[in-house]
Image (spheres, rainbow, N blue to C red):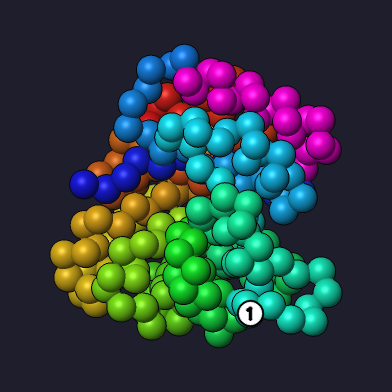
Amino acid sequence: MREKIVAGNWKMFLDAEACETLTRGLKEKFQSSAKAGVHVILAPAYIHLPAVQSIVKGASGISLAAQNMHEADQGAFTGEVSAIMLKSYGVSHVIIGHSERRQIFGEEHETLAAKVTQAIKHSLKPIFCIGETLSERESGNTIEVIKTQLEKGLFHLKANEISECIIAYEPVWAIGTGKTASPDQAQEVHAYIRSLLHAKYGNVSEDISILYGGSVNAGNAADIFGCADIDGGLVGGASLKVDDFMQIILSR
Ligand code: PGA
């Protein structure tokens, strides 16, 4: 059985007080909603991880993710954060390869593959993001881009390692733009991702959660989550508001 997951990527938003207020609000509503079986993952900025951890500690169904991490155990890497540090703050998941990391910060396939290996080594579950740009889609290259990102970033893993991963399909043209992929467009790529996983790893592919991300909101979540190969969402903007994010969680 694949896990149903709704993850909130808070990016570089929220100061200390706003982050705590949002976390408390979500925790209270989630705990009183009686929605069983959905795993909520919160990904605040690094600096907020300890505060969010102290609020959600012990709350069942809520986990903590980092938005990035360095691929080395430790060292003279000013400004970076290691898997060991994240683990020591109760972080269980880490987003790797978000399109903003790939595009703005120039993270390449090799670096991302090394980060995935490092996360697995330290028992952090990667949420590995892939997705095509608008020009790649319009030139008919979506499938090729997805295949390359998966093969170069994840397919060095063994079956028992990839089963620890979550994949997020996030078309770059849908992130933060208000333009969502239609359920059919998203399902088509999700089914393709699962077919690649199946060809490489066999039945393990059935157990790997594949999330959709890109302008998911309270109004479109139910339709997107209704697709056979969409196991949940990675939500940016709409995860910053308690009521919107709760509605998305309840749609899963
Ligand atoms: P968005 O962001 O929901 O604001 O489009 C999604 C993401 O970047 O993960």
Residue 236 showing in the rendered view? no
Q: In which quadrant will I find the C terminus?
A: top left
Lateral position of residue 98 relative to residue 184, left or right: right
Image: magenta residue range? 13-31
* Residue drawn where x is 65% and y is 36% of the image: 54
- Give the residue at x 24% y 63%: 205
Using the rendered view, name the quadrant where residue 37 is placed: top left
Name the spot of residue 28 as percent of width and height, x first: 56, 19
Of 230 and 88, nearer the camera is 88
Quadrant hosting residue 194: bottom left
Q: Residues within 10 Å of mark 1 (few under 14, many from 20)?
A: some
Mark 1: amino acid: Ala
Q: Which residue is mark 1?
A: 72
Disc 1 secondary structure class:
loop
User: Camera-side residue: 144 or 226?
Assistant: 226
Residue 61 appears at what percent x and percent y?
43, 35
- Furthest residue toward top: 32
Query: Taking 8 as reference, is 67 above or below it?
Result: below
144, 194: nearer the viewer = 194
- In the rendering, at what x and y percent does residue 157 appear? 36, 78
Left or right: residue 26 versus residue 15 is: left
